[in-house]
């Protein structure tokens, strides 16, 4: 158990730049990997099954829910999104740190199931910056933009339930700060107990 | 309060290399400073008052204890050692991160008084390494060496009460890891509340 990787939940409102930050984070350390979610949403142009998402049927997804093989799942805009327990466990057992890029509802479920997980929220510098980013994407009409902003406010209020909150005023800096957090968490006392006990047991041997 | 520095307690058994690690840590960031302790022990050759320690009389020290102007204090080998509350508060209020290099008893007192402090324990890779380092110093006779090792075992057992435990198998690496911890702790939710509330208040202004 001691060499297991860390399970890291990364959330942030739409437009917070979490995809760019995650990309940069993955480049900082080969041992940090992204978990690929399963979804019932149809694939978009350029998306690759098994790389961007595992694209599955609604029937398969509902089976996974009832068989409890998902670590977390949620429904957005009529589509299911979820994380396979097996996929994540395999990565963690191999010692890799696994990042789940999921929404606050999924993060809540992870907290309940995996006490040892680390939850990091990416905060935009201001709502103006967030609105600006969403507007510049050009993929949103006015109504959808407004609904995303309203949702962002709810998500930011919920961020206080996370472990860490990192401002994204610069994607490189934000990624480095998250990397710092992941590194630091490995030295938390709860994760160092075995090593301390080893040193203490070894002291007993010397005494004899 | 938001721009206050962090109070960092750094402990480790005699021979764990904490002095070298602290020196290296201070070189990594000008904003991290060491708090200078007061002591009733006579100064040794080369030691400078106000740099290595504040060398004070036993009377002055006992006055400080009864006037409660110390953040922590303890007695070792007949001499008092302690940290002035005023000195530390001034540094913290100026936004600097303040490191107290103190023993486990002082760390316990700090935990009681300063909930927001960060306690980091430096662990040797093994008791053999620790014994070897103390032996090579050449400053200890056999009896004193044995008593230091016995004490080290007690201190290591107490390390599980700290927040973080960092192995010192390499002083540069150990200093960098401690720096990583200090950086990461600034993003803990408890220290980010004000910033989250600012973003949320600013959202309300946009809505109007």
Image: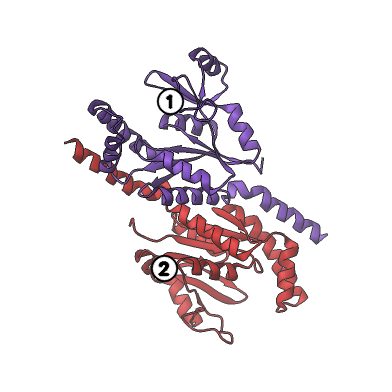
Chain colours: A red, B purple
Q: Are marks 2 and 1 on the same chain?
A: no
Spot occupied by residue A32 in the image (x, y as percentages of width and height): 45, 66
Label 1 sits on a secondary structure element that is loop
Q: Nearer the viewer, residue B98 or A164?
A: B98
Badge 1 density bin: few <14, some 14–19, many ≥20, Cα 10 Å: few
Quadrant of the drawing holding the C terminus of chain A: top left
- Numbered label attached to residue A190: none
Which subunit holds the residue at mark 1?
B
Q: CA distance from mark 2 to mark 1?
A: 59 Å
Identity of the residue drawn at 34% across and 58% down:
A3
- In-image side of A61 versus B91 (left or right): left
- Numbered label attached to residue A88: 2
Q: Which residue is mark 1?
A: B45
Q: Is residue A164 above or below residue A147?
A: above
Q: Is residue B73 above or below residue B2?
A: above
Image quarter of residue B31:
top right
Spot occupied by residue B26 in the image (x, y as percentages of width and height): 52, 43
Q: Is residue A187 visible?
A: no
- In-image side of A84 versus B69 (left or right): left
Q: Is residue A208 above or below residue A8?
A: above
Residue at the extreme front: B46
Q: Nearer the viewer, residue B105 or A4?
A: B105
Image quarter of residue B84:
top right
Spot occupied by residue B67 in the image (x, y as percentages of width and height): 57, 17
Badge 2 density bin: few <14, some 14–19, many ≥20, Cα 10 Å: many
């Amino acid at each position: 158990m001691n060499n297991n990787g860390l399970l890291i939940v990364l959330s942030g409102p739409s437009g917070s730049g979490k995809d760019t930050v995650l990309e940069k984070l993955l480049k900082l350390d080969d041992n940090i990997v992204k978990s690929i979610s399963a979804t019932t949403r149809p694939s978009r142009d350029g998306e690759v099954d098994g790389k961007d998402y595992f694209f599955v049927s609604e029937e398969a997804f509902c089976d996974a829910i009832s068989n409890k093989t998902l670590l977390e799942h949620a429904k957005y805009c009529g589509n299911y999104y979820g994380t396979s327990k097996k996929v994540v466990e395999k990565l963690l057992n191999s010692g890799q740190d696994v990042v789940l890029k999921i929404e606050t509802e999924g993060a809540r479920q992870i907290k309940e199931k995996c006490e040892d997980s680390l939850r990091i929220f990416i905060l935009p510098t201001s709502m103006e910056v967030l609105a600006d980013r969403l507007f510049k994407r050009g993929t949103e009409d006015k109504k959808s933009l407004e609904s995303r902003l309203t949702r962002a406010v709810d998500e930011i209020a919920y961020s206080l339930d996370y472990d860490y909150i990192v401002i994204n005023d610069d994607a490189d800096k934000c990624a480095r700060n998250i990397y710092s957090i992941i590194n630091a968490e490995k030295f938390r006392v709860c994760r160092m107990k075995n090593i301390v006990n080893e040193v203490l047991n070894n002291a007993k041997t010397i005494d004899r």
